[in-house]
Image (tube, helix red, strand yellow):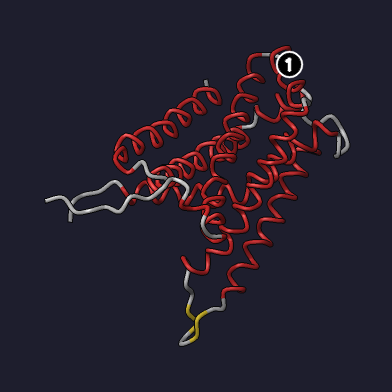
Amino acid sequence: MKSYVRPMPTTWWLRRGSYVFFMLREFTSVFIAAYLVLFLVMIHRLYQGQAAYESFLESLKSPLAIIFHIVALAFALFHTCTWFNLTPKALVIRLGEERLPPAAIIIPNYLAWIVISVIIGWFVLKG
Amino acid sequence: MAKSNEPIWWSLFSAGGVVAALLVPVNIFLTGIAWPLGILPGDFLQYSRMQALMSHPLVRLYCFVLISLPLFHWAHRFRFTLVDLGLKSAHALIATVCYGTAIIATIAAGIILWR
């Protein structure tokens, strides 16, 4: 016997704001992955030699590339915020009877993120 | 309970989520926005500088982790997103293609970085 599965249109997630938010969150990973593949291509070109690398750098300056990176950054920041805001749900720390408040878990995440980003920026610029 | 690969994929998803959250925004900003638009001082993506930077083993390891783990994060998320969008009948094929892509990209990254 086969149970009945109610058909669901592909556009179900457009019905509610919270569903759209969910779908956008799921799609952050697509932009992050696309950027990382481009980044791998950049490293590959670097190892191919100066001419190959510099032609890649030139393509980074095209308006299309800049628009892509701005959109990818927006999605990446969306991922960072939603990921950090989820951590108290995955990581429950108890102090005796009391549960550590979510903010005490979320805020250190943001601080660590800022410190790491500054260190990487400093390393790339000055290192 | 049947033996399952799910804990492996979930661990990689989770680790990739952390790496993507902490490291990806600054990398996109530096290579894709700040350098092409000249927001920050200096030609910091210059060939000789990047070559010197990439000769450091820790920088290569950083790039490997940065590229590989978030791709597994993508694979896990995208797999379930496609199923949620109605491709339930093809779930086994979707899982193979998604994780397969992440594995191939990881191998490619390893070859490019350390050959």
Residue underneath mark 1 = A55
Picture quarter containing residue B24? Answer: top right
Give residue A124's position: percent from left, percent from top.
75, 38
Foreground of the two, A14 or B31: A14
In this view, which residue lies farthest toward the right? B41
Q: From where the camera sits, is residue A127 visible? A: no
Kindly identify which chain the residue marked by label 1 belongs to: A
| Horizontal arrangement in the rendering, residue B82 relative to residue A70 (left or right) | left
**Crowd class of label 1 (few under 14; some 14 to 19; many from 20; radius 10 Å):** few
Give residue B2's position: percent from left, percent from top.
18, 52
At 57% across and 60% down in the image, what residue appears?
A17
Q: From where the camera sits, is residue A93 visible? A: yes
Picture quarter containing residue A106? Answer: bottom right
The answer to whether B22 is drawn above or below residue B89 in the figure is below
| Horizontal arrangement in the rendering, residue B96 relative to residue B73 (left or right) | left
The answer to whether B66 is drawn above or below residue A119 in the figure is above
The answer to whether A61 is drawn above or below residue A74 in the figure is above
Give residue A81's position: percent from left, percent from top.
62, 58
Q: The N terminus of chain B appears in which quarter of the rendering?
A: bottom left
At 58% across and 34% down in the image, what residue appears?
A34
In this view, which residue lies farthest toward the bottom? A97
Query: Element type at marker 1?
Result: helix
Foreground of the two, A74 or B12: A74
Q: Amino acid at mark 1?
A: Ser
Foreground of the two, B8 or B85: B85
Give residue B101's position: percent from left, percent from top.
43, 31
